[in-house]
Amino acid sequence: MPVVTLFYYALVAFVSVILAVNLLKSRKWERDVLYVIVLLPFLLRLLRLK
Amino acid sequence: MTSRLLAQKIVIIGLGLVLLATSGASFYHSRRLKEPVVLGPGVTAVKQLADYFEPLRGTANNCNVYLLEGRERGATMLVLGGSHPEEPAGRLVAWILAENAVVQKGRLIVILSANRSASTVTRLGGAYPPDFSIVTRWGSQTFRMGDRWTNPLDQWPDPEVYFHYPSRQQLAFVDIRNVNRAWPGRPNGTLTEQTAYGFMELIKREQVDLVIDLHEAELQYPVISTIVTHQRGQDMATIVSMTLTDNEGFKIGTEFSPRTLHGLSHREIGDHSPALSLLFEAPEPFLDATRGITTREQLLTGKDEFVVKAGKHGLLFEKIDEKGWPIDVRVGRHASALLQVAETWGEDHPDKLLVITQVPRYKDVIEKGVGSYLRDPAKAAGRVIYE
């Protein structure tokens, strides 16, 4: 796997962690739903499913 | 965190996990859908692209290479199906060749998944169906839908601008994953470039005389219903075009490959090898930007009221009516054009013939349907491999 691709996956993982932390911190259900929806494609890429 | 807030988060995260699991399972199975190929009576060997370029071994693009050796020596034709897997007529013609063709003189080399990685993904945001099925006499056979570009799971990220090698011509960034913008490829390049390089190695080592790259195009694209040819194939392509138009009941034109447009098979194969390179385009309304709902039925029937409406406004480069462009018509056009190229080549090279039999022509495919030429893998034990 090229180095640039490894950096890309590290970036995806970093953003995923930030989204997950924000999800846990949020106190409004609307924001929870938003964070989950935004997080999904990041997890699908991290898991190499899409 | 209050218990109410905790319960709220558990429910929402749980729903998210359900979505992740269901969509993930769908993507996983779509990427790994096995497409059976029944080796026809003419297949004499099956190799892999990595046999010609070792670094491709273990990658998604180590596709199968089907060799059909004739009883007598003659010309060698390479047929590329699946350069753009979302243009299924090309792959289906290659399937028909691998499962039916018998070569009397010369040699046929058939590729069903030229960019195999691209066949494992659909266009992001395109709402494509993940697969499609062709009805046969023994049931149906399902194929991966595929996309125009290498799967981002196999090659990512894309650059801001794609510099084609070796011309340094600037192309659209996304085309760095388009095998038909990567010719002639390079050995230390991206997966897509390595794939093109592998095919160039095959062309040189097998001393290929003719390369046919099978495609389909949207009706809003001016290069449609045509044979695109390298300048060394202009005479032959023109004769093929005229013969088909006169004898087979469908119109097909000829386009000459621009000398300064790089990366395409009809340009680079001809420039970097002794082979003549031709590219066929058939109409596929599924690809049109003005199409309606993108369904399996639309893909196979080629019917779309919105594309018809675009035609009434003069926005198309090919005719379309309520009958659409059925897959049988598109496959039949490619099959006849391919056979006609072999026949026309033979007229110019009587000492190096290419005689292919057991392959249906345009009228045969329309009359019997593509599915009639797909063999039942359940009744072909020991002669089935997978794409």
Image: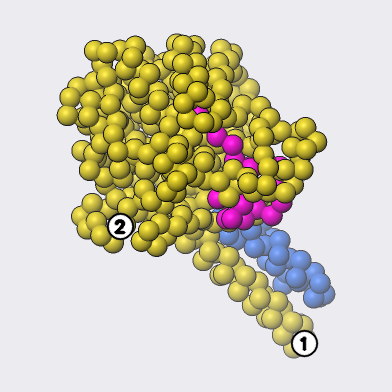
Q: Position of residue B263 (x, y in %)?
A: 53, 23
Q: Which residue type does callout 2 highlight?
A: Pro
Tell me which corner region of the image, top left, top right, bottom left or bottom right, holds residue B198: top left
Q: Which secondary structure, mark 2?
A: helix
Q: Position of residue B30 (x, y in %)?
A: 49, 58
Q: Which residue type does callout 1 highlight?
A: Arg
The reply to whether residue B50 is in sight is no
Q: Among all residues in the image, which is located at the extreme left? A: B71
Chain B visual colour: yellow
Q: Residue at x 55, y 19 (%)?
A: B254
The residue that label 1 is drawn on is B4
Residue B293 shown in magenta: yes
Residue A6 shown in magenta: no
Q: Position of residue B236 (x, y in %)?
A: 44, 15
Range of magenta residues: B280-300
Q: Residue at x 46, y 11 (%)?
A: B235
